[in-house]
Amino acid sequence: MFLLNILQEHGQDAAEHGAAAGQAAQTAEAAGHGAAAHAEHIPIIVEKLNHWLGPAVFEIQKAIMPPIYSALKIFGPHWPGEGKTFDQYVAEGYLPIPTQVVMFLFVVLISVVVLTFLRGKLSVESPHKRQQTFEVGVEALRELLNDLVGPGGMKHFPVVATFGILILLSNLTGMLPDMVAPTANFNVTLALAITSFLYYNYIGIRENGLLGHLKHFGGPVPSLFVMIILFPIEIISNLARIMSLSVRLFGNIFGEEQLSGAISAMMQWVLPALLMPLGLLTAVLQTFIFMVLSMVYLGEVSHHSDDHHAAPAHDHAAATAH
């Protein structure tokens, strides 16, 4: 990522030069110091957005965040911005609008533009090349849903396809100059994993009822003794899927970015370009794994209690994906 290194060096020089010119550049310089303190690159788009909207967002956070920290007690003793001004908050390395939030909003915007472009004007008689490309992806996902979820799997197409598009574009964003992949931040991958977890449990309750869904955690053997043993194990196993989905995606994308950055710092002109296909492979593979596991989990709960014979196939698919 030699282009990224060049832009980083240029951004740091510009921030230092602008700090002597006025108050606006002082905010950018403070953000740069915060990035250095957290060993995190802050793209220009994030700095600009925080410069324009950061003070207003900070005032809103000052009103709502201290009570939340005080009530939950899990994020720390107090909110880091409590009793501080905006400039002091930024100087300590914090941003009112975090990098991952800006990057993910960027990905959402790009997703809408790309899908609109690919869709174009649909035609059955004379489909254009963009429509044919679009249809290839739709058909591939349709086959996966039919294989892993069942004949009714297409009703989950919007959710699974949304996961795929957002995660793929998020992963690829890290390959752009002066950009950071949102999925290189654990908060983003955890949110995606929780969304997948809540969705497939919602589907299980909606299709099988609450008791039927809970019975699913008791195993396929209709024995009270076996159900008592398996139920807590299955609950813990299902909760562990949140960490499995989030940590796998985060670890691979974050690790790839750190590796590329370290190699780019040593050799900026040849080797980083050779590593870009590896980054592309990682982005696509991790997207595929997240989607497949989400479909496997949906397949487990989309069948009623008399369809437990399908469970071994799903378990085998999940083991293969792992």
Image: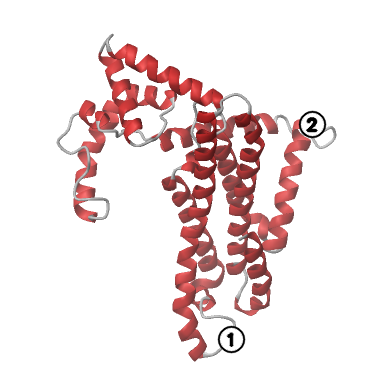
* In-image side of 271 versus 233 (left or right): right
Q: Amino acid at mark 1?
A: Val
Three-letter amino acid code of the residue under disc 2: Lys
Residue under label 1: 221
Residue 241, placed above or below residue 256: below
Q: What SS does tag 1 mark? A: loop
Which labelled disc corresponds to residue 93? none
Front position in the image: 199 or 188 = 188
Question: In the figure, is residue 146 to the left or right of 209?
Answer: right
**Residue that protrudes farthest toward the front in the picture:** 266
Q: Quadrant of the N terminus?
A: top right
Does the CB distance between marks 1 and 2 fall below 8 Å? no
Q: Which residue corresponds to the image point at 57% horizontal and 47% vertical from the top-left? A: 163
Q: Residue at x 27, y 29 (%)?
A: 90
Decide which of tag 1 and tag 2 comes sooner along the chain: 2
Task: Provide residue 134's location: percent of width, then percent of height.
Answer: 72, 38
